[in-house]
Image (spheres, rainbow, N blue to C red):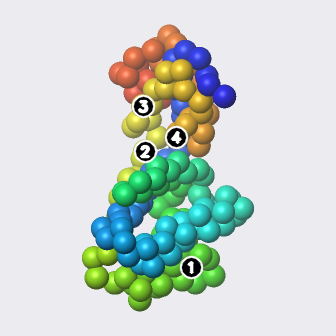
Amino acid sequence: MIQPGRMTASLPGDFVVFLIGMRINRPLQIHKWLPVARAMPRMLRELYQRPELGFIHAESWFGRTTILLQYWQSLDQLRAYAANKETEHLPAWRAFNKAVGTSGSVGIWHETYRISAGSYEVFYGNMPPFGLGRAGTLQPATGRLQSALGRLRGAQP
């Protein structure tokens, strides 16, 4: 549902933003990239079903280059999930290395950002809850929260 007007969002405390994705370098090699593309939905289902792992929310964009934006409670929880033999990630990672390796048919990437409380600002205009607005708490961007600088200062006493 669209939230009319100007909105901002917050997430209490520190958190992690994790960007991950894949790039289809050789589109005709479906047998190489399709298993990679199918692995992430399994991981997301698992993460949404197990909030104790520290995952908060994800947004995704699909195309030749696929991007998945994730919010995590902490870097330690993200790293623990990546290394956990009992979850979906490690088997998928091993399967990728075995099937694709360095062939170049599929590219994968990720970026990890630690976000300190009060060191970010967000704005949404006439948008449905999205990104941090779905991971955290939405509120009207009024008063001191009306400008980017005000939102950055708004978290400070």
Where's residue 15, x and y in %?
49, 50
Q: Which of 122 and 40 is in front in this view?
A: 40
Answer with mark 1 or mark 4, whichever residue precedes in sequence: 1
Per the image, the residue denoted by label 3 is: 121
What is the crowding at mark 1: few (fewer than 14 residues within 10 Å), some, or many (at least 20)? Answer: few
Q: Are marks 1 and 4 in contact (CB under 8 Å)?
A: no
Q: Which mark is residue 116?
A: 2
Q: Do the residues labelled 2 and 3 touch (CB within 8 Å)?
A: no
Q: Between disc 2 and disc 3, whose residue precedes?
A: 2
Name the N-terminal-most of marks 1 and 2.
1
For the question of whether residue 157 can be seen, the reply is: no
The type of residue carrying mark 1 is: Asn
Q: Distance between the residues labelled 3 and 1?
A: 33 Å
User: Callout 2, which amino acid?
Assistant: Ser
Q: Can residue 100 be seen in this view?
A: yes
Q: At label 3, which amino acid type do we have?
A: Glu
* Residue 41, horizontal then vertical, whole percent: 59, 64
Residue linked to disc 1: 84
- Residue found at x 50% / y 10%: 143
> Toward which corner of the image does residue 105 lie, by quadrant?
bottom left
Placement of 5 over or under 94, stated as above or below: above
- Per the model, the C-alpha gap separating discs 4 and 2 is 17 Å
Q: What element carries label 1?
A: loop
Give percent across and percent down for residue 153: 40, 24
